[in-house]
Image: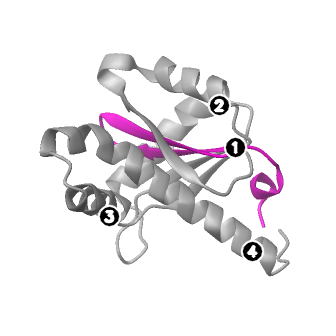
Amino acid sequence: MSEASERPGRALGLDVGERRIGVAVSDELGLIASPAATIDLEREGLNALLSLIERYAPSVIVVGLPVTMRGREGAQAAETRRFVELLRPHVRCPIVFWDERLTSTAAERLLTESGMRRNRRRQTVDAVAAALLLQSYLDAQRSRQGRGEQK
């Protein structure tokens, strides 16, 4: 189990894209992830994200790492890692990477099946993808705690 998962409090999930960042937040017990916002980096910049981080005061930030189906990191994973290095000096809590394979696809499918119109889906899909990856992380941490695994 990681140090980050042992600390109580909210977790913040980030789905980092080329232009937008989907943001999700957990409840204070770390049980349920919910979409919080989509930040357009070109329009709003990093300060919008830092404002959300300050607002929610997470105990951990979980960043989706886009890997291939074979588990390898490609160009987008390298960009995500670079973004995290820009973010790291501005936050006090741990930042962990989490496999985000297929979260955007699952989010798109979920929103389509709910009947959401295409224009609205584009505005929402990144935050929903962030919630899916954060929920996956939270579930894995609870599972590890239930098995009594340590660091």
Disc count in the image?
4
Up/down of 49 relative to 98, above or below: above
Name the kind of residue labelled 1 in the image.
Arg
**Horizontal and vertical percent position of residue 7:** 82, 50
Disc 4, SS: helix
| Residue at image mark 2 | 56
Up/down of 67 relative to 27, above or below: below
Instruction: Tell which circle, 4 or 1, labels the residue nearer the N-terminal end.
Output: 1
Farthest residue to the left: give it: 118
| Residue at image mark 3 | 106
- Tell me if residue 9 is in the magenta stretch: yes
Instruction: Tell which circle, 2 or 4, labels the residue nearer the N-terminal end.
Output: 2
Task: Tell which of 90 and 23 is nearer to you.
Answer: 23
User: What number is the disc on residue 144?
Assistant: 4
Instruction: Tell which circle, 1 or 3, labels the residue nearer the N-terminal end.
Output: 1
* Gap in angstroms between the C-alphas marked 2 and 4: 25 Å
Q: Do the CB atoms of the residues marked 1 and 2 lie less than 8 Å apart? A: yes
- Tell me if residue 72 is in the magenta stretch: no
Mark 4 or 1, closer to the camera: 1
Residue beneath the point at 78% across and 67% down: 1
Q: Which of the 4 image quadrants contains residue 88?
A: top right
State how the image is colored: one colour
Up/down of 39 relative to 60, above or below: above
**Horizontal and vertical percent position of residue 127:** 40, 43
Locate residue 7 relative to residue 121 in the image: left or right: right
Disc 2, SS: helix
| Residue at image mark 1 | 10
Residue beneath the point at 39% across and 50% down: 128
Mark 4 burial class by Cα count in 10 Å: few <14, some 14-19, many 20+: some
Disc 3, SS: helix
* Gap in angstroms between the C-alphas marked 4 and 1: 18 Å
